[in-house]
Amino acid sequence: MEITAYAMKTQLAFEPLPASLALDATGDQYTTPETHRETTADLSQFKYVRGSVAWALNLSGASATGSADIELKNGTNVVGSETVDLSSGTNLRGAFDVDLTSVNGAAKLALNVSVTTAADASTTADFAGKLTIEHPLVVRG
């Protein structure tokens, strides 16, 4: 018999304050600065590690167009992502699950905002995000 319970949660915030970014041009508009990237232990040794990214994007004003991908990266590899419709409001919030079994601690984790379709001219936003990791506790008997 094997029982897996999630005994602890760790939350990693990628910015002490929300970061400002432009949304009126395509491409990578934000990547967590090197000094705020998170290093973890080797999570790949666990059978399963639950993780989720929660994010907030507060636009400077309403935009009629635009979309962006919010990504969690392990070095240059995308671990998980979500596409956001920038025309759906000004205070956007969301969360997406990530599979952390490929995170081996060799590269730092970072959040990235990539604009795929530009928002209205002069649209900016404040961005913040955090990663929640649930640690497994396995009991065998």
Image: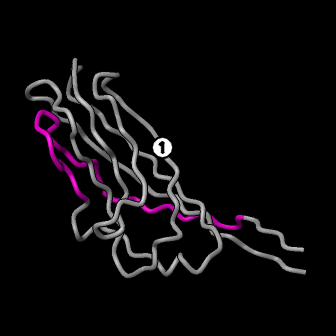
Decide whether residue 67 is among the magenta residues. no
- Amino acid type for the residue under numbered disc 1: Ala
Which residue does the image show at 40% across and 59% down from the upper left? 13
Q: Say which quarter of the image contains residue 60.
A: top left
Q: Position of residue 18 (x, y in %)?
A: 28, 48
At a point 45% along the width and 47% down the height, the residue shown is 54
Is the residue 6 above or below the residue 41 in the image? Answer: above
Specify the quadrant that holds the C terminus: bottom right
Disc 1: CA contacts within 10 A as few (<14), some (14-19) or many (>=20): some
Please tell me which residue lies in front, 9 or 46.
Answer: 46
Front residue of 136 and 26: 26
Count of picture labels: 1
* Location of residue 23 in the rendering, given as x and y in whole percent from the top left corner: 17, 36
Q: Is residue 24 left or right of residue 110?
A: left
Question: In the drawing, does residue 33 fall left or right of residue 91?
Answer: left
Looking at the image, what colour scheme do you see?
one colour
Which residue occupies 26% across, 60% down? Answer: 32
Closer to us: 40 or 101: 101
Above or below — where is 12 with respect to 24?
Answer: below
Q: Which residue is mark 1?
A: 95
Which quadrant is home to the N terminus? bottom right
Kindly state the secondary structure of the residue where label 1 is placed. Answer: strand
Indicate yes or no whether the magenta region holds residue 22.
yes
Residue 82 position within the rendered picture, expressed as x and y whole percent measured from the top left? 40, 43
Q: Is residue 134 above or below residue 57?
A: below
Q: Residue at x 77, y 68 (%)?
A: 4
Above or below for 52 versus 66 = below
Q: Which residues are magenta?
A: 6-31
Tell me the chief SS of the magenta region: strand
